[in-house]
Amino acid sequence: MASRSDENWWTFSIDPAVRADNSKSRFTGEMDVNPELPGGLRRLDYHDYLGLDLLLGSQRPSSQIPDERAFIVTHQLMEIVFKLVVFDMAVVSATLGSFASSPRLATDTLDAKPDDGFWRPALTAAARISFACRGLLPSIMRVLSDPSDADETFNSVEFHRFRENLEPASGFQSAQFRLIQRALGKANLLSVRLFPADTYRRLYGEDAGDTVRVDDPVILREDANVATPAQGEPRERAARLEDDANAALERLADVAGAQPDPNGPDAVEAADVNRAIVLLERIMSKGRGRKTGAAAAERFREDLTAAASRENERRSGLRRARAGAYVLRRRAPGSPLRDILSRISAADEALHGTAHDSFLSVHLRVTRERLRQIRAYAAKSGEPEPSIGTGGGGIEYLGWSQRYLIPLFPALVAYRELGD
């Protein structure tokens, strides 16, 4: 559940009449952040409005190593951006859901203009989602010293002096990122047991298998309900983004009288599933020992095969959504709805794609260079080579998942396969 302090954050309206009426859109009572005092005075100032006491007091280093402060702030910045992305996804989802349930809106959408009052919040929200994934998140990650940048902004030798203080904490424990992946059509992917759990099991003292789902409570702890919000929780609206987008396309197909596409979106190919499995088996056998790696790989084979089957069953039900996508592209190429869906699709690619400047690509380069520097320092100094974190099994896992696993579960598959 969202905390009481988040009540204002999650209380929003997409109704143009509410947004245009100050008496309706303004918070009152206990929710009013700037109540009027006697004499018409106001008390709110910049510091209080932004909650700077809490915000600037939330950095708690574990060491006296200066670079640890950059490490903390970098991850906090990413989580703040994730929070805005999740909220913006909820705005887009609510808009698409309202569109799908309104006969008038669906009828009018082919003639809708970008300045249409109904679409305005979703357009700006979708633009922020795309910008955050294309620009903000990769740039924030570069604070941890992208090797393609000229100046080193974060030193790997300094990093390993404090990193072991933090086990088992890892960037892969970001529940908000898992929620974003769920919103981007990756619910079936999140069901696959892949994440190495030995460090978490040992240090948290909980029973878990050799590998677990990335959104398992042993990994995410009490934040597991953020990654998989219950029905009726505010974040659950964001988690429904993929479903609401498909419902909007289906509604558009119905209004246009379009027949369901007999083929539907492309299925996940068995050959692609098998390739991902074979390549992972090699990584697991090398990194975890032959016997342990074989057992983990077999669980992964079972899970990914089942996930691909569920994904193909889901896609077989998207024939009407695919027909709506054809209508949208052919008859309303400049519509707000198309702009929104294109921005969401682009955000998914900016987060997970293989382009040099995608978020995962920058993450890989930063982590790979850090590992190289740490190994070089350890060999030169005679110190033992430390762990650089528990995140997902290492560089080979990350590179493999980016190339061979995540692409099997793209966002908005009924829409994006048609191209822009």
Image (cartoon, helix red, strand yellow):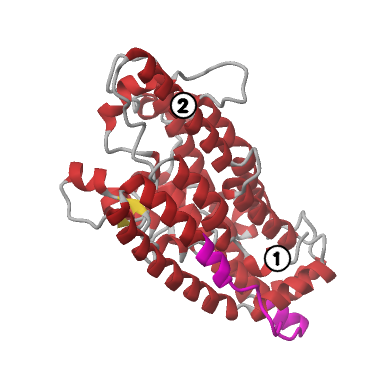
Q: Position of residue 224 (x, y in %)?
A: 32, 54
Q: Say which label, 1 or 2, has the lower sequence index.
A: 2
Hey, which quadrant is residue 419 in on the image? bottom right
Q: Position of residue 78 (x, y in %)?
A: 48, 37
| Disc 2 crowd, CA 10 A, few/some/many (<14, 14-19, 20+) | few
Task: Please state if 318 lies on the left or on the right of 234 as rendered.
Answer: right
Say what amino acid the circle numbered 1 marks: Glu
Q: Residue at x 51, y 72 (%)?
A: 311
Task: Please state if 98 lies on the left or on the right of 39 as rendered.
Answer: right
Which residue lies under the disc numbered 2?
A: 372
Q: Which residues are magenta?
A: 251-275
Is residue 365 visible in this depiction of the protein? Answer: yes
Q: Position of residue 53 (x, y in %)?
A: 36, 25
- Helix, strand or loop at disc 2? helix
Q: Which mark is residue 30?
A: none
- Residue farthest to the front? 290
Q: Residue at x 40, y 17 (%)?
A: 377
The Cα–Cα distance between marks 1 and 2, rounded to whole angstroms, is: 38 Å
Q: Residue at x 65, y 39 (%)?
A: 356
- Helix, strand or loop at disc 1? loop
Say what amino acid the circle numbered 2 marks: Arg
Which residue lies under the disc numbered 1?
A: 417
Q: Position of residue 350 (x, y in %)?
A: 62, 46
Is residue 1 visible in this depiction of the protein? Answer: no
Q: Residue at x 60, y 60 (%)?
A: 15
Nearer the observer: mark 1 or 2; the answer is 2
